[in-house]
Amino acid sequence: MTAPAGGAPSLPAEERPWPGMDVAGLRILVTGFGVSGYAIADQTMQRGARVLVVDGADTPEIRERARILEVLGAEFRLGAEHTRALPEDREIDLVVTSPGWRPDQPLLAAAAARGIPVWSEVELARRMQAADGPAWLGITGTNGKTTTVTMLESILRAAGLRAVACGNVGLPVIEAALDPEGFDVLALELSSFQLHWTEHLDCEAAVVLNVSADHLDWHGGAEEYARAKGRIFEGVRTACVYNTADETTLHLVEEADVVEGARAVGISLGAPGLSELGIIDGILVDRAFHPERRSSAAELATLADLAHLGPQGAGPHVLLDALAAAALARAHGVPAHAVRDGLRAYRMGAHRAQHLATVDGIGFVDDTKATNPAAAAASLQAAERVVWIAGGDVKGADLGPLVAAAADRLVGVVLLGLDPVPFTEALSRHAPEVPVRRIDPGETDDVAARTRLMEDAVQAARSLAAAGDVVLLAPAAASIDQFRDYAERGDLFAAAVTRLPGEHA
């Protein structure tokens, strides 16, 4: 029984039975009013919770969205002053935080000190979802999450399942988990931020694609970052999928507390061992879920089925993503032919190794989401001869290993960004013969100026390229020094490519 309005709820949040947790009467503080914050407030208010939302931003767009939920009874406090401490005029039973809020943020630290549970949207969704709700297939990693989760969605749908990509891409998890029509399977892309605040995932199967240095300031170091990634394996029932080329991913599997009987399943670009998926003679094969896996492998797809995913076929990182998606689907019981059909039907999403066009024999690829060296390194390996458009805010990353590994593939480099020194120093050490063109940053305060900047970069790249080469936007850096965000950077690149003279294919 729930207490009357104004009183305390009958049971604390952490003691309420789940799955199918009842949130009626809970006094919930939602921190951050982005996509997930809106979904949290909406879904919990519909079920009787009393919701207060705080956000440091106070813009007309946010106020417009807030008005929709205010009609339903939510309260909003916008502005930085409301994010520095817990509200003094009311009790809070549960804080549900947006993924961007750091653990040391004062309000969240105060909640933890007072013993108020702090959950992610994902944790809340898992608890609120009914016992007979959709299965969860989880994906995390430093790079490749979005490609893998959308590939998985395509495979699951090819198998005739009602499935959706959600989490860090697509629908918020809480909307997908509580969808009134009911999904069969959720393909979840989960960031380290989301996982930090999540204790119970209980995925049917999950994968950590890779772990490299990223977001270390948020997590407080590499060990904590990796530990957050590893949370995705907690409670796995069927398969923990890891990258055999990344020892950290195997270590995370070995450390995970899983349901008895869950298996470790490896993925690699070579011939697979027992309980692995890999590639033999241009064929993606399964020796993990195939009934005769001790003596043979099941054919899942061919490299030709994935050839449309790059100007020179699918790159190594795309193939690994495909194997990861296949492993999760097979763990759910999807037949081999659906893996093939789903991969054949799959098309890259915007800004992730997206082949835009071939102009006079030169391929143009948008991988603006490659915002760190590890992501850019994977993208650079997908072509034999590359004119690389790079640059931006590297946030202190060491570019030497990236340039050294790619040097033999580089036929030219075009540099964006306000500070080219990290790139020019690495290039002078490891690729001194490669021609470099730096684009004058000028003023980039408006869209017209940013458009001209990218036009200049594309023109410079084309002048360095010949037929058969690939012009690749894989910046290895954040966009914030010159562009609104990585998406704008990619959109302006794509627009500049469409305006190039010549024969487009």
Image: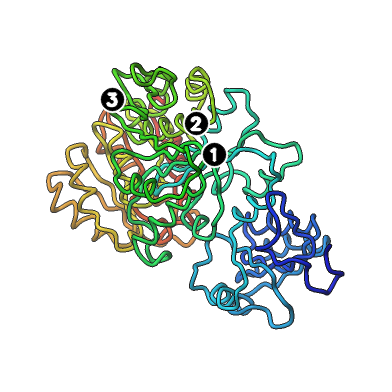
Residue at numbered disc 3: 271
Earlier residue among tags 3 and 2: 3
Instruction: Name the secondary structure under disc 1.
Output: loop
Point out residue 176 in the picture as x, y percentages from the top left corner. Answer: 66, 43
Instruction: Name the secondary structure under disc 2.
Output: helix
Give the residue furthest to the right: 4
Q: Cβ–Cβ below 8 Å for labels 1 and 3?
A: no
Earlier residue among tags 1 and 2: 1
Colour mode?
Answer: rainbow
Packing grade of label 3 (10 A; few <14, some 14-19, many >=20) is: some
Q: CA distance from mark 1 to mark 3?
A: 26 Å
Judging depth in this view, the residue of 438 and 77 nearest the camera is 77
Query: What amino acid type should be assigned to the residue bearing mark 1?
Result: Glu
Q: Cβ–Cβ below 8 Å for labels 1 and 2?
A: yes
In front: label 1 or label 3: 1
Q: Which quadrant: the C terminus?
A: top left
Numbered mark located on residue 204 in the image? 1
Residue at numbered disc 2: 331
Judging depth in this view, the residue of 159 and 378 nearest the camera is 159
At horizontal 42% and vertical 34% (from top left) the residue drawn is 324
